[in-house]
Amino acid sequence: MPFPGFIEIVPLTASVQAEVSVPGSKSITNRALILAALATGKTELRGALWSEDTQMMVNCLRNLGFDIEVQPDPGENSNRTLLVTGLGGEIPKSGSAAEPLELFVGNAGTAARFLAALVCLGEGAYRLSGVPRMHERPQAALFEALRQLGYRVESANDKLPATIFATGPRSAECVVSIEESSQFASALLLCARVSKWVVNVIDQNADESPYVSMTTDLIAEFPREGGTFQIEPDASSASYFRGANWLLQRFADTRDSEILVASWMEHSLQIDARFPAVLEKFPSRISRRDQLGDSIMTAIVLAPFAEEPKLFTELGRLRLQECERVKALKTELTKCGAKVVEQGDTLTVYPGPLHGAGIETYNDHRMAMCFGTLALKVPEIKIKNPACVRKTFPNFFEKIALPPPHGLGARILDAGEARVLVTAELHAE
């Protein structure tokens, strides 16, 4: 059933008691898929996210010749159990210089970066391309590192589309900067053991380094000879429900709400697992560099309901992702009546009442989910293109609408027809 192009969430007026499950981590799922392909034998990935980004990765790995079996997950319908047959570093298929093997990555940054390194282990030519926004996103530092390792990379502007000429594993050394994205280093590190590469990471910073640490920790934990690996729930996705709990408790009619996230991790590889602790204190200054990852967007949209102005700093990386997120957050919050000041790579958000508005999502899943959370208490917020949540959380709005205890029980309307949508209409395929 097609997802409506324009929805409105009716604010909640009664307290909610719920424990909501969220899908598996996108970051861990796509890293685990690469490691499973490089392992020897069959690896079972449990709790793996099944969304646009991870399906792009699975499709590309299958195009490369890997056998991946997809099975349902009984506990979460946006997860799957993935059975990956690894070939110990062999890449089964390739193309020629005249006809490179085509790999389409959509707007999945992890797929674009991780596959660029992986295909170097093959023999032949590969062409990576994506949607127009992916063709604008950085790739230069990774391509330069691959050239240092001895591989030929052709690109008009050091972005996608690009053709990579692979010559297999080789003992070589490179330097890679993570100033623009940690995914450049992660791509190389995921392949380093099999490829015999020595990878030197420079421009280390607290903004990006936690994602490199996630990669190295995951490599250390992962079964190299096949086996079973459990994917953590996605901490960034969990932030919307943790944020909803914080928001509802600020209003008299919903003050007794308690929204928990099922299977929450006591110890996590993900920086956004810090979100509940940061939100509990909600300090006057929050940095994306050393406190939160993408969940800082959730904190930004909640800030008008805080008791003091909040300064969000080191936001530069947000400008290079699915959309120019700093500008997008300021623009859409301002539409809702918030006072937001942008200065350099910071946003200051002032407390004050909000009202409804038509929210442009910029085809960015996190914009849709952030303002979906805000709409739980702000009336007449109408969200355009809500189906963009398919990128990482296809059943997000379904969770919002499901009755407690597995959802929040909100009514969601087709904003064009003022018709209440049933949950079956709220899964973004």
Image (cartoon, rainbow, N blue to C red):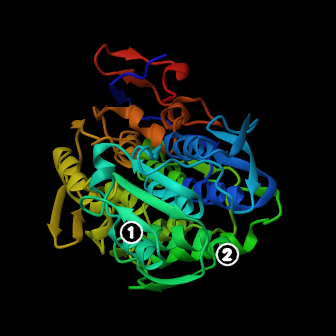
Spot occupied by residue 315 in the image (x, y as percentages of width and height): 30, 69
Q: Residues within 10 Å of mark 2 (few under 14, many from 20)?
A: some
Q: Residues within 10 Å of mark 1 (few under 14, many from 20)?
A: many
- The residue pinned by badge 2 equals 193
Label 1: element kind: helix
Task: Determine the residue positioned at 24% across, 46% down.
Answer: 354
Residue 340 seen in the current view: yes
In this view, the residue in front, 418 or 156, is: 156
- Quarter residue 291 falls in: bottom left
Left or right of 310, for residue 128: right
Spot occupied by residue 22 in the image (x, y as percentages of width and height): 60, 46
Tag 2: residue type?
Arg
- Quarter residue 207 falls in: bottom left
Residue 231 seen in the current view: no
Task: Determine the residue positioned at 46% across, 67% down.
Answer: 183
Tag 1: residue type?
Phe
Label 2: element kind: helix
Establish if 16 lies above or below 267: above
Q: Any mark on residue 8, and which?
A: none
Left or right of 295, for residue 48: right
